[in-house]
Amino acid sequence: MDNNVAVIILAAGLGTRMKSGMAKVLHTIMGKAMILHVLETAERIAGTNIVVVVGHQADQVSALVERHITVRFALQAEQLGTGHAVMCAMPEVPSESEHIMILCGDVPLLTPETLQRLLDDHFSNQRDLTILAIDAKNPTGYGRVIMDARGNLTGIVEEADADENQKRISVVNAGIYCVKRMFLKQALAMIDADNAQKELYLTDIVAVGYRQGARLGVVLAPDADEIIGVNSVAELKQAEILMKKRAVKLA
């Protein structure tokens, strides 16, 4: 745990594919809301230096979280993209935190060990931005990690914006970032909504960093199952199966 590090958890979405009127992060896995699984992992990294971005059913999400841990909340009143969500969170990040880890509230299988590995790599290489990625058997639906001829990270292209060559790339963005606070603040000011979804993508800070000559890097997650995002009832069931298997192994 490092006081120099804060965690932002993006938890504002409704999750329409869940076919439920309940905010996505409130759905349970092994009897516990998804957001609580993510919070337990974040707490191991940053203690209470955590900002949860809420939106849909903000009061219910906040009330549940507050019963388990003391964190700060940021309201994303309109869902205008992941970049916008982080913009909403920035004023709440503790002033002493020079580095920020960004997680999603719907990735309940993520482990503290993987986050620590990401953090250690980020610090040891003195980077401005380090992303977590996976080499996916089926990359469909994920943002592709773009590298130049020298193997340098140059950007992330979302599926909806990818051309046919980019869609063949198997290394995909896990949606988990470790960013130097000063760089993040500057990069967020430089992104726009010129994309298929007309949203402010957080992924665009990678291309901003490349253009500016920032120190960027990629860490591959050891287990692709860890970064499964839960967006549907089927994925919720799959996450429960995987978590039960993990619990049996640890028993």
Image (cartoon, rainbow, N blue to C red):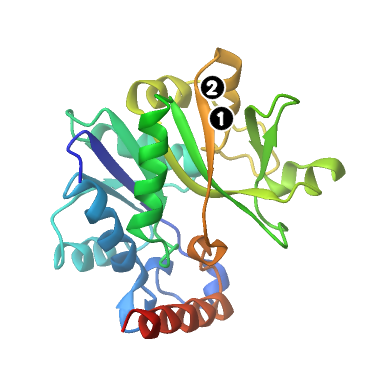
Q: In the rendering, at what x and y percent does residue 154 appear?
A: 64, 27
Q: Residue at x 33, y 61 (%)?
A: 38
Residue corresponding to mark 2: 209
Q: Label 1 neighbourhood size at 10 Å, few (<14), some (14-19), many (20+)?
A: many
Q: In the rendering, at what x and y percent does residue 97 appear?
A: 22, 31
Q: In the rendering, at what x and y percent does residue 49 appear?
A: 19, 44
Q: Is residue 124 above or below residue 169?
A: above
Camera-nearest residue between 75 and 7? 7
Marks 2 and 1, Cα distance to the nearest angstrom? 5 Å
Q: Residue at x 64, y 49 (%)?
A: 172
Q: Is residue 76 above or below residue 64?
A: above
Q: Amino acid at mark 1?
A: Val
Q: Residue at x 16, y 66 (%)?
A: 68
For the C terminus, give its image quadrant. Answer: bottom left
Q: Amino acid at mark 2?
A: Gly
Q: Dots 2 and 1: beta carbons under 8 Å?
A: yes
Camera-nearest residue between 140 and 148? 148
Residue corresponding to mark 1: 206
Q: Is residue 204 above or below residue 187?
A: below
Identify the image quadrant of residue 231: bottom right
Camera-nearest residue between 240 and 195? 240
Identify the image quadrant of residue 149: top right
Disc 1 is placed on an element classified as helix
Please give the count of numbered marks on the rendered protein.
Answer: 2
Q: Is residue 2 left or right of residue 243?
A: left
